[in-house]
Amino acid sequence: MTVSDRTPAHPAWLPPEAFRAIGARRVLVLGDGMLVETVREEITVACARFGGQVRHRQDQAGERFDLVLALTGALPAMPTAADAGHPFLGSDAAIATWQYGWRGAPEALGGEGFVLTRREEVTVVLADEPRGLLYGLFEVVRLGESAFGSGLGAAIHRPAMRLRMINHWDNVDAHPVMGQVERGYAGGSLFWQDGLPRRDLARVQAYGRLLAACGINAATVNNVNVHRAETHLLTDRLGEVAAIARVLRPYGVRVHLSVNFAAPIVLGALATADPLDPAVRDWWASATRRVYEAIPDFGGYVVKADSEGQPGPFAYGRSHAEGADMLADAVAPFGGVVHWRAFVYNHRQDWRDRSTDRARAAYDHFVPLDGRFRDNVIVQVKHGPMDFQVREPVSPVIAAMPATRVAVEVQATQEYTGQQRHICYLGPLWSSVLRFAPHGPDGSTVADIVAGGGGFVAVSNAGADHFWTGHPLAQANLYAAGRLAWQPTADPTALLDEWIGLTFNPATGDDAEPVRRTLHLLMDDSWRTYEQYTAPLGIGFMVRPGHHYGPDVDGYEYTPWGTYHFADRDGVGVDRTRASGTGFTGQYPEPWSQIYESLDDCPDELLLFFHHVGFRHVLHNGSTVIQHIYDTHFAGAERVAEMRQQWHELDGLVDPALFTRVVALLEEQVRSAEEWRDQINTYFFRKSGVPDAKGRPIY
Ligand code: GCV
């Protein structure tokens, strides 16, 4: 699926036509700075294409504009009543200035916010900082013609989260098993090829634009599993990171680096990486100083420590707080942060040992450390307690560390959700995580908690593939990740609609309305469809070990990885109750602690995550567990076959290359969904001996 560097990448949600409404108008851009230049350039290109005009000054009184994008600091002095007749200031900016009064209260807009308003037929974007202006521009792009209609209300836009981050799991070298991008399904890395940095960074620049246009402002460029070559990105290969940072900087995206906790040994020839050893601390301090000399706006470090074989502080009898704080001290003088991942568990568990529960691990390791992390440490928590399964409860860690900055991590790369061969729009899953209220409906949501300092992190699904994401429709996941980080209360279906509107554009020959309708049919519920034909009722895994694609019900059952379903002839599921199981339910505050503990109250979709039940256990939906398994698997696979048919209705209505790619992928999705259906149904029929009430084929 990878194409050569020279093939222009698919424009994704920024086709030139998306700028038509702006590019056909008279535009004034006021302000200075690198990101304001980016805004100017975007508008200049659009105006050259669509016949509009862009100005950088208002030279003559009486000169009118359709769109003004201005930094507040570049506006002439506070307008007075005498300015009332002024063509621009006397109307929109003045009104907006007075209305929102941010000059008196600069925090109202913040470094990334903007005001968007329209009065007297001028659309105005005002921001205190260049980043705000850039985001304001992309909001106008999203709105298209409606940004210039009388219906546009005045509003302040600000991101809910300060840190809106993408983590790449890219390696410099191709790994013999994982390939170049760990869990990557979109071709090679955008940054490296054949062990060397890509010489032409035009794709990286295009990527930066796409990230900015959906609101992402930070990116790690390398895998959290930091192998040997990648360890050197911190020192002698730092220039490669600096080059990427240079290209992403004009789009407001700061670069962060995944680092190897043992770097002082690997790179510094020290005998130890003990975080309390003064020589180790000095080593990190000077390595970090050099990083900031090369990349003054460097974001900081991301660390996977003591997890799946990565080195960490445990080797020295130190805690994760001691490890994280040591790195935090190194980046603190420069304003950097450390994202310290909470994905720490025993991956060498004995499957015979029923008392060890991987779901408990992050909480058991990290919650006792609450309050012991420096202010510039962010504990980065996967959204569920296991590992990015199609259905998991929200991780209890998120609500349990009130004295720590916590970020929530989601996986845009579809490791466990179809590997970008299946259509699986993840916006609804992430939205349900962000809206989850750990203390009940009157308490804070996950979004509130992470907005308090940690932010939102998505593992990237993008690569060197022409369509960026392997499956062209998986672009929507990257887009939604950025948009949800900006506005976690946004309706994921509305975000999908935005993505469709930008990407499938009538001006490129796409017939917009049927495309919109069909894509909603295919994508709105695709996460639930995927759930229907894969592992049932929250149990998770059941995937082929290693590559994690396709069904293998017992593939992980007798392994050290801690991911078990415990099916026998009578029933299935993991007893995680306090009463008789691993006690994991006790990691939740009320009301969830009680809801998950109770067989009666536990939501159906998580039943097997929390309880071991008999096959004839009756769900809230009235069906038995076994019949529900059969019904959902038949329904899911049937739905995918319908999706394939629905996609064919778009033949001739969308870009032919994209159409053909999706045709091929849907063939695979149909095949795979049938495989899942038949293996899961057959497995449970053979275990339970209970036939399908509807007599459908089971093997
Ligand atoms: C980067 C899962 C994946 C690994 C990944 C790990 C992590 O275990 O299968 O490939 O490693 O999560 O998030 O660190």
Image (cartoon, rainbow, N blue to C red):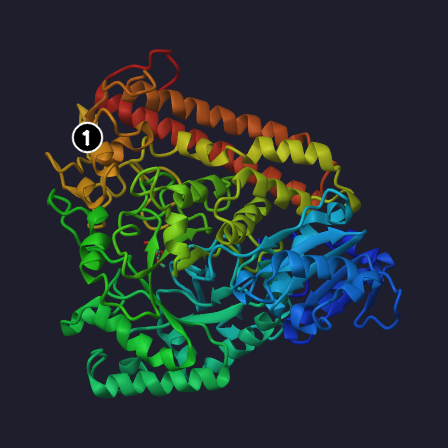
Q: Secondary structure at mark 1?
A: loop
Name the kind of residue labelled 1 in the image: His
Residue 666 visible somewhere in the drawing = yes
Residue that carries the numbered disc 1 in the rendered image: 612
- Left or right: residue 635 compared with residue 143: left
Seen in the picture, residue 28 relative to 228 is either above or below; the reply is: above
Of 612 and 668, which appears nearest the observer? 612
Seen in the picture, residue 564 relative to 683 is either above or below; the reply is: below
Residue lying at the far front of the rendered structure: 81
- Left or right: residue 307 compared with residue 91: left
- Left or right: residue 400 compared with residue 517: left
Residue 268 visible somewhere in the drawing = no
Question: Ligand 1 lies in which image quarter?
Answer: bottom left
Label 1 CB less than 8 angstroms from ligand 1 = no
Q: Which image quadrant for residue 675?
A: top left
Q: Residue at x 71, y 57 (%)?
A: 95
Seen in the picture, residue 377 relative to 545 is either above or below; the reply is: below
Of 601 and 13, which appears nearest the observer? 601
Q: Residue at x 34, y 21 (%)?
A: 628
Name the quarter where the C terminus is drawn.
top left
Q: Position of residue 434 (x, y in %)?
A: 41, 46
Q: Residue at x 65, y 76 (%)?
A: 33
Q: Position of residue 35 (x, y in %)?
A: 64, 71
